[in-house]
Image: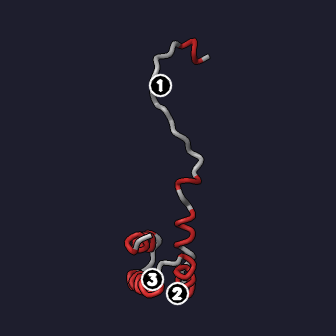
Amino acid sequence: MTFKDLEFILELNGVMRKDIDYILDFSRKNGIDKEEIDDELNRMGYERIVENELDDGWDEDEYEHVEKFPHKNKFSEDYD
């Protein structure tokens, strides 16, 4: 995760700008550690944002590839 990613996640979750600047400075000094950032957000009165956002990845979605048009021509008998 980059600092831009962290800033984007915080903005999306409604963190105030002065608090975003503080978290970015905190992360530059201590490194980007999800648990430490979320602990600091908790101390500031926010929910645990970073761990929750990053845990919801695309890999865990149950969606599969959908083929809108088959590659081969099929007769209607093949669909039965």
* Residue 44 marker: 2
The reply, left or right, for residue 37 in relation to residue 17 is right
Q: Earlier in the sequence, mark 1 or mark 3?
A: 3
| Residue 71 in the image, given as x and y percentages of width and height | 45, 24
- Residue name at image x 47 percent, y 71 percent: 13
Q: Is residue 14 above or below residue 27?
A: above
**Separation of residues labelled 1 and 2 (CA atoms):** 54 Å
- Residue name at image x 40 percent, y 86 percent: 25
Q: Is residue 46 above or below residue 56?
A: below
Local SS, label 1: loop
Instruction: Give the amino acid type for the residue marked by disc 2 in the picture.
Output: Met
Instruction: Give the amino acid type for the residue marked by disc 1 in the picture.
Output: Pro
**Separation of residues labelled 2 and 3 (CA atoms):** 15 Å
Instruction: Give the amino acid type for the residue marked by disc 3 in the picture.
Output: Ser
When asked about the image quadrant of residue 55, the answer is: bottom right
- Residue name at image x 55 percent, y 41 percent: 64
* Residue 27 marker: 3
Q: Earlier in the sequence, mark 1 or mark 2?
A: 2
What crowding class fits label 3: few (fewer than 14 Cα within 10 Å), some (14-19), or many (20 or more)?
some
| Residue 6 in the image, given as x and y percentages of width and height | 43, 73
User: What residue is disc 1 on?
Assistant: 70
